[in-house]
Image (cartoon, rainbow, N blue to C red):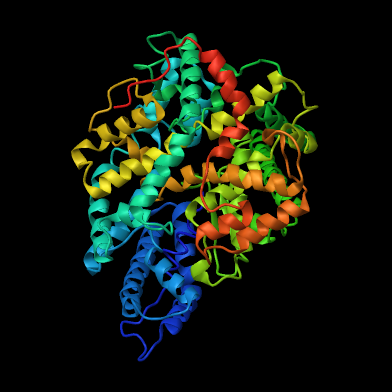
């Protein structure tokens, strides 16, 4: 996830980073104004990023105040600059200046009212929502019997415990953390909408949709078109998964009116079904790609070696050795991912990356563990990731994803700061996932995580299923979150229907339903970080289309011949050169032009998704023949 740079470095570096004078310089030209914007971005960049970093890695009242005040100051400056930019509407200016001014207006996902009191209220609420999520725990019992679990512990239950009731309790437990957010979120929407209207937009959702170099209505239609391309594949996967859950839990528990029970997908938000692999594996034993066991074994080997060097280790020494083994494993996993990028000819990460990043959950404080990548200063000499890494396949691929953001920062660091962001936000999310697609069995063998790759139809279907459980399963989820927020922002979803509308959209797009009633006493949207964190989410849906387009283009550039799903361009200098050249452009030109330079076309297109998964889609149709696929979609 790309948060707290660039979007926060263009909302706290167009927000915190912009010190606008209340009275602009006399006779200032548009080009001079654009230069002043970029200069002040640079001057105040680190104030915003450092405050945000502290707020997420040291959750307490002090860091909340620091972050809220920094955001408040920055939003006030940002509003002043946006107002000053209106002087140049309709005036001749260079293309770069015109783009700088256009991006300035779209530089924050949290438009703030001009009224100082309301602006402060918005900044305070935003920080409180962020920290409420980060400190969230599910607690049971009272007094000495009170036991609390954090998101990592709850997620582990859903990932590995197939007991129906244990999964239901864990899923419901996490969703208690968002109940207190509901009132704050309603007020947040009111304030952000006021700010959006003052900037000339109908509401915040309309402002978000305006950021794609096309009319907002055309963008909404474009996402519908892309979803229409992949929807038949998703519906086949949903049907197959439902039948396997029914076989596991019975017809009364394994499905809800033809939909997947929300707590049985192995994931808190039903966005990734990879933890259901033991249930969904098409051909048990064929081409085993058990990365979880391989990574855990490596961690255990490190621990055994550390303990072997200590004679009769005490309990405290054992704890410290385990912590060191965890850290060494997290570093090794990160360096493995770094090696893919450097193998393409990209630069090594700065030395500070490994000393400044948060790779493990600290033992002495609350933090936001949700993975994110950070550009801390204008020249990208200080870049970091924030994670709580565990030795699992999901965490490993997340590291590869997050380093995609980091390498995008490094690639466009020489652009003016107003262009230091993705061609559009879906590009930023797609960079690392394009790398993940190249993590084929052959690649995994080359880095010592699996043995000899089996070549057979069964092996192909197994490998495709594993990828589909992460990629295809995600797509409707990537779409529905902002469908909900667009409705919340435009008023078509009223506050007294927040939860009902959430589950209506989950049903419509994902074919997922809760096993028990979820009335308006709950605020289930807030249990997903990006809602209280106010991160637009359609970018992730777009990235799941773009990454396959990028992947196909890089495979072609590498000279690969064969089925698309077998391609790995690891270590290919030409693929790396072309990818880096695209990344260097940042937001300096419309995304359509950037896309064309890599892929040859100006339109986002999911045909590469269908080409990649063609064997699996044919297999799923065979498996589902005669089954009553589909579900009520409202």
Q: Which of 634 and 452 is in front in this view?
A: 634
Is residue 387 or residue 438 the one in the foreground? 438
Q: Which residue lies furthest to the bottom in this view?
A: 26
Q: Is residue 423 left or right of residue 19?
A: right
Q: Position of residue 184 (x, y in %)?
A: 26, 48
| Rendered view: 409 above or below 57 | below
Could you tell me residue 282's position as x and y percent?
61, 17
The percent position of residue 176, horizontal first and vertical second, equals: 33, 33
Q: In this view, does 491 lie above or below 594?
A: above
Q: Where does residue 183 sit, x and y in percent of width and height? A: 23, 45
* Residue 522 seen from this side: no
Vertical comparison of 255 with 405: above or below: above
Query: Left of 589 or right of it: where is 317?
Result: right
Residue 129 as seen in the image, left or right of residue 329: left
Q: Can residue 454 be seen in this view?
A: yes
Q: Identify the residue at image location x=41%, y=72%.
A: 101
Q: Quadrant of residue 482?
A: top left
Q: Which of 268 and 341 is in front in this view?
A: 341
Residue at screen point 74% across, 35% down: 562
Q: Is residue 15 above or below residue 211?
A: below
Q: How many labels does the image show?
A: 0
Of the 4 image quadrants, the one containing the C terminus is top left
Q: Residue reaching furthest front? A: 601
Give me the residue at 56% from left, 24% from top: 617
């Amino acid at each position: 996830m790309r948060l707290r740079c660039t979007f926060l470095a263009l909302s706290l570096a167009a927000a915190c980073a912009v010190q606008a004078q209340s009275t602009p310089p006399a006779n200032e030209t548009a080009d001079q104004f654009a230069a002043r914007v970029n200069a002040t971005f640079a001057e105040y960049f680190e104030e915003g990023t450092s405050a945000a970093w502290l707020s997420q890695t040291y959750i307490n009242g002090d860091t909340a105040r620091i972050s809220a005040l920094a955001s408040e100051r920055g939003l006030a400056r940002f509003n002043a600059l946006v107002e000053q930019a209106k002087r140049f509407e309709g005036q001749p200016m260079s293309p770069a200046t015109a783009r700088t001014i256009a991006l300035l207006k779209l530089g924050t996902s949290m438009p703030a009212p001009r009224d100082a009191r309301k602006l402060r209220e918005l900044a305070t609420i935003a920080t409180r929502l962020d920290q409420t999520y980060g400190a969230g725990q599910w607690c049971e019992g009272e007094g000495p019997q009170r036991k609390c679990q954090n998101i990592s512990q709850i997620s582990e239950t859903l990932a590995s415990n197939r007991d129906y009731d244990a999964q239901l309790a864990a899923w419901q437990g996490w969703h208690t953390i968002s109940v207190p957010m509901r009132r704050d979120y309603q007020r947040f929407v009111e304030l952000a909408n006021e700010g959006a209207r003052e900037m000339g937009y109908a509401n915040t959702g309309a402002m978000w949709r305006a950021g794609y170099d096309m009319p907002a209505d055309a963008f909404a239609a474009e996402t519908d078109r892309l979803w229409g391309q992949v929807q038949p594949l998703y519906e086949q996967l949903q049907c197959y998964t439902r039948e396997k859950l029914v076989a596991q839990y019975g017809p009364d528990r394994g499905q809800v009116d033809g939909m997947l029970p929300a707590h049985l997908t192995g994931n808190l938000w039903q966005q990734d079904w990879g933890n259901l692999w033991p249930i969904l594996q098409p051909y048990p034993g064929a081409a085993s790609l058990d990365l979880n066991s391989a990574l855990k074994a490596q961690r255990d080997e490190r621990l055994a070696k550390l303990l072997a060097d200590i004679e009769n280790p005490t309990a405290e020494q054992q704890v410290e050795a385990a912590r060191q083994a965890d850290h060494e494993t997290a570093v090794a996993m990160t360096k493995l991912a770094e090696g893919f990028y450097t193998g393409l000819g990209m630069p090594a990460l700065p030395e500070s990356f490994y000393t400044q990043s948060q790779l493990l959950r600290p033992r002495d404080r609350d933090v936001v563990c949700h993975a994110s990548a950070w550009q801390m200063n204008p020249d990208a000499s200080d870049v970091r990731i924030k994670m709580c890494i565990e030795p699992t396949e999901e965490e490993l691929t997340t590291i590869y994803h997050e380093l995609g953001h980091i390498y995008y920062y490094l690639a466009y660091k020489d652009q003016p700061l107003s262009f230091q962001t993705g061609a559009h936000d879906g590009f930023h999310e797609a960079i690392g996932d394009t790398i993940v697609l190249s993590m084929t069995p052959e690649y995994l063998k080359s880095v010592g995580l699996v043995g000899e790759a089996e070549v057979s139809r069964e092996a192909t279907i197994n490998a495709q299923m594993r990828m589909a459980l992460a990629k295809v399963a995600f797509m409707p989820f990537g779409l529905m979150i902002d469908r909900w927020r667009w409705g919340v922002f435009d008023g078509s979803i009223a506050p007294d229907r927040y939860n009902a509308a959430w589950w209506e959209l989950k049903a419509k797009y994902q074919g997922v339903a809760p096993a028990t009633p979820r009335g308006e006493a709950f605020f289930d949207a807030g249990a997903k970080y990006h809602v209280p964190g106010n991160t637009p989410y359609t970018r992730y849906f777009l990235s799941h289309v773009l990454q396959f387009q990028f992947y196909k283009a890089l495979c072609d550039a590498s000279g690969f011949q064969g089925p698309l799903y077998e391609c790995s361009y690891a270590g290919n200098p030409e693929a790396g050169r072309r990818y880096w050249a695209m990344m260097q452009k940042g937001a300096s030109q419309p995304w359509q032009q950037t896309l064309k330079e890599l892929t040859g076309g100006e339109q986002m297109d999911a045909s590469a998704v269908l080409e990649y998964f063609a064997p699996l889609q044919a297999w799923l149709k065979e498996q589902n023949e005669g089954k009553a696929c589909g579900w009520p979609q409202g």
